[in-house]
Amino acid sequence: MNMTEVKAVAKDLGVKPGKMKKEELIRTIQLAEGNPQCFNTNFSQQCGQDECLWRGDCD
């Protein structure tokens, strides 16, 4: 997902992206959704969120 798409998701949730980098913005979105902030962390492969919107970009 490109940054423009990530910002659109953020806007829908009322998250203001400001100058956040993609990784930080996605984690902020995850928090706003009530999900673990696991994007690109050591936990991301064991999070159990197989239907996560960010799964395709997650390491």
Image (spheres, rainbow, N blue to C red):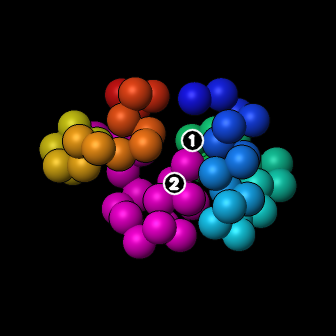
Q: Residue at x 56, y 59 (%)?
A: 29
Query: Element at badge 1?
Result: helix
Q: Is residue 20 left or right of residue 22?
A: right
Q: Residue at x 83, y 55 (%)?
A: 18
Q: Residue at x 77, y 62 (%)?
A: 16
Identify the disc placed on residue 8: none
Instruction: Report which residue position mark 1 lands on.
Output: 23
Q: Which residues are magenta?
A: 26-42
Occupied quadrant, residue 50: top left
Circle 1: residue type: Glu
Q: Position of residue 37 (x, y in %)?
A: 41, 58
Q: Is residue 37 left or right of residue 15?
A: left
Number of residues whose C-alpha sits closer than 10 Å to that of mark 1, classed few (under 14), some (14–19) or many (20 or more):
some
Do the numbered discs 1 and 2 sit on residues whose CB atoms are within 8 Å?
yes
Q: Is residue 43 visible?
A: no
Circle 2: residue type: Arg
Q: Magenta span has 29?
A: yes
Q: Is residue 35 left or right of residue 13?
A: left
Q: Position of residue 25 (x, y in %)?
A: 63, 50
Number of residues whose C-alpha sits closer than 10 Å to that of mark 2, classed few (under 14), some (14–19) or many (20 or more):
some
Query: Element at badge 2?
Result: helix
Between the C-alphas of marks 1 and 2, the distance is 6 Å
Q: Magenta span has 3?
A: no
Q: Residue at x 36, y 51 (%)?
A: 38
Looking at the figure, which quarter contains the N terminus?
top right
Q: Is residue 34 left or right of residue 14?
A: left
Identify the disc placed on residue 27: 2
